[in-house]
Amino acid sequence: MKTALSGPVRVRFAPSPTGFLHVGGARTAIYNDLLRQSLGGSFVLRIEDTDKARSDEAMTHQIQSALAWIGIEWDEGPFLQSERLPRHTERALELLEADKAYRCFCTTETLDAQRAEAQSQGLTFRYPRTCAHLSKTEIEARLAAGTPFVVRLRMPDAPIEVRDMVRGDVEFPPDALDDFILLRSDGSPTYHLSVVVDDIDMAITHVLRGDDHLSNTPKHVRLFEALGAPLPAFGHLPLILGTDRKRLSKRIGSTSVEEFRNEGILSQALYNFLALLGWAPGEDRELLRRREMIALFSVEGLNASAAVFDREKLLWMNSQYLMSLPFAELLPQLLPFLEEAGVPTSQPERLAAVVDLYRPRARTLRELAGCFGPYFAERLDYPLEDCRKFLADAELDARLTELGRRLAALPSFETEAIDATVRGLAEELGVKAAVLIHPTRMALTAATGGPGLFELVAVLGQEATARHLASFQAFLAANRAA
């Protein structure tokens, strides 16, 4: 059995454009990306769009957009499989000429009856090779009569053994090997023929794909051999399950990659998270930048058992990236959320200050963008229920007025000066600092929690601080009167 491992590494990702790119496909693309980069080689993107009834051109663009967002770059393609159908047909006719394939004239009704009979006996249907040994005279007579036919590949009567990069040695017994169809009765190539011809012509050396293709592997192995081509190294990745150990539902992860982007997940975090769903880099390492993953990756580290998609783990990992990424890397992905929230984005230094203030508290970009309001809004909406305790404090208005006067007079609006001002006023008034801190936080952010008040005030600035304090006092006065 010839292998193709001696040449340069060439991997391919070959999605079908019948739906969005989901986490399973994204993980497969990531492993192919890591494999070719760790060994040095090329990544081929091929769109398997031969199912015209279900393929959607919009999905082709979505797949490319999602891959690019994650950070996967392909060296060649995207190639559309539908544009290569004449080549696929040409290779099937070569097999027919070499007697490695044959015409099958059996009708659909005959095959359906045979299949039903096998099922009634609890057997797996296997084509009985009715047409495998027709004489040349019989074949010519049926062709002359215009009898429809398909072209089937002759499968061996011996087991097919495959050395799988993930699962180890896998053997397929003869009774599982059916003489499958290469060309349909309308002359169109089947998936199995197209994928193998494309892999041969594109010199693919490693086929890393989902384990739903494992049952296709003996067919593909036989086709490679029949076409006189060396075999690529096959590897089949296990399913991704939910935390309930069942197949992913949309509620817990079976969603398009772009839904994660819309939710506020960073592309770097999603790449890291998906890479660890079935691969162990060793030493219990979890947070890895791309260059580290490339250096550590090997197919030997891929796990043959199903991985679990833990949404909370993804959010935790995203929060770690939010805290650690330089502002310049974070900003391009944050900007759409800021624009959606109506936050002006023309002051990058001010944006960076707010990011540094809130990034330790956010799990997603959407959450982070939601913290920007007080720093750019003219007025805030105060939650009445949370403010009732402040309405009952008859002395609060005088305290806030004096605090506002002192903050406005500060020559340097820095954290230390703000801290000293607030604590100094509290001491003069004979109250705890918290008596000033809690209502001031509400006045400036319309929230009961958040980052340290003095850092918050410094980032907010004197002008916005004075404006929000005045608005809050007006809010309290109006609601006391009501």
Image (cartoon, rainbow, N blue to C red):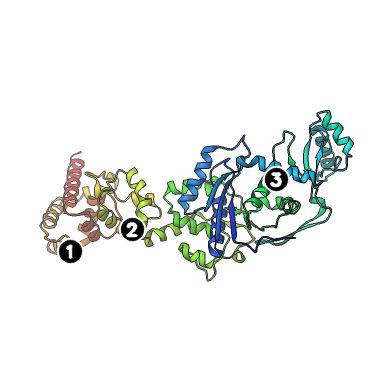
- The x and y percentages for residue 6 are 65, 64
Whether residue 22 is visible here, answered yes or no, is: no
Residue 208 seen by the camera: yes
Label 3 sits on residue: 193
In the image: residue 137, left or right of residue 370 = right
Using the image, determine if residue 301 lies above or below residue 172.
below
Marks 3 and 2 sit apart, C-alpha to C-alpha, by 49 Å
Helix, strand or loop under label 2: helix
Placement of 142 over or under 424, stated as above or below: above
Q: Residue 327 carries which label?
A: 2
Whichever of callouts 1 and 3 sits on the residue coming sooner in the sequence is: 3
Label 3 secondary element = helix
Categorize mark 3 by other alpha carbons within 10 Å: few (<14), some (14-19), many (20+).
many
What residue is at 56 percent from the left and 58 percent from the top?
Answer: 31
Which residue type carries mark 2?
A: Phe
Mark 1 belongs to which amino acid?
Arg
| x, y percent for residue 412 | 14, 61
Nearer the observer: mark 2 or 1; the answer is 2
For mark 1, does the 10 Å Cα neighbourhood hold few (<14), some (14 to 19), or many (20 or more) residues? Answer: some
Which circle's residue, 2 or 1, is located before the other in the chain?
2
Front one among 163 and 358: 163
Q: Which amino acid does label 3 sit on?
A: Leu
Looking at marks 3 and 2 on the same chain, the residue that comes earlier in the sequence is marked by 3
- Number of dots carrying numbers: 3
At x 11%, y 54%, the residue is 405
| Relative horizontal placement of residue 42, taking residue 356 as reference (left or right) | right
Measured along the vertical axis of the image, is residue 262 above or below residue 432? Answer: above
Q: Which quarter of the figure has residue 450?
A: bottom left
The residue wearing badge 1 is: 423
